[in-house]
Amino acid sequence: MPRKKRIWFTGAKYHITSRGIRRTSLFFDDDDRLEYLRLLKQTKLLHPFILHTYCLMTNHIHLHIETIDHPTGTIMKYLHSQYATYFNHKYHYSGHVFESRYGSELLDSVEYELEVNKYIHLNPLRANMVQDLHSGVRPPPWTNAIIFSVRRTDFGCQQIILSKIGENPPSSRNAKG
């Protein structure tokens, strides 16, 4: 049975998820996460898109992207094939790194988009990977939640989300969603 064709159009916004095969770790150390982020930036240069939000958990990832010229399939195929090559080479593995085809949800309203961003940003809190998103201590770059709070723009797109919720968004300090 053929797979359902994904909806794509210029300016479409998606919540992208992907998990390690058999729910195993995608990232064993900070170097793995940094490599994924490096590849994410490289992918963004080769297949332009807007990255609104990201979160790298231990065994899965969340991305909130907006397409420009390329469908999500082109973007994710490049990103994940490059990361799989890196991962398999580093750990002397072979075969699949990601469990299955990436998941993508079309974000069809501003309200849903904001809800997804909240979910993505609070994911490390819920998993007890961090105690507070806004403690002033710069955590490793596993999520861009801290970038939002200090107005840094490694990917140059955080202001778009902030403009939708006002200049002083509600604090997520110690929030569990």
Image (cartoon, helix red, strand yellow):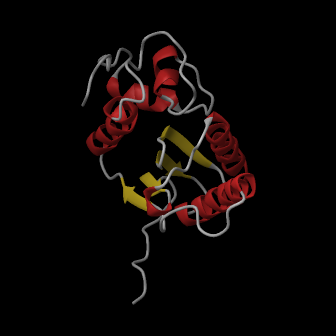
Q: Residue furthest top?
A: 136
Residue toward you, 100 or 107? 100
Image-based side of 113 in relation to 9, left or right: left
Identify the image quadrant of the C terminus: top left
Identify the image quadrant of the N terminus: bottom left
The percent coordinates of residue 2 (x first, y second) are 43, 87
Residue 92 falls in image quadrant:
bottom right
Q: Which residue lies furthest to the front in this view?
A: 92
The residue sitting at 67% across, 62% down in the picture is 93
Q: In this view, does 89 lie above or below 41?
A: below
Q: How many marks?
A: 0
Residue toward you, 84 or 72? 84
The percent coordinates of residue 137 (x first, y second) are 51, 12
The residue sitting at 72% across, 47% down in the picture is 42
Q: Which residue lies furthest to the bottom in this view?
A: 1
Q: In this view, does 88 lie above or below 144?
A: below
Q: In this view, does 153 lie above or below 103?
A: above
The residue sitting at 35% across, 14% down in the picture is 168
Residue 114 falls in image quadrant:
top left
The percent coordinates of residue 128 (x first, y second) are 36, 29
Residue 153 falls in image quadrant:
top right
The percent coordinates of residue 160 (x first, y second) are 47, 31
Image-based side of 131 in relation to 33, left or right: left
Q: Is residue 12 above or below residue 145?
A: below
Residue toward you, 68 or 21? 21
The residue sitting at 35% across, 21% down in the picture is 166
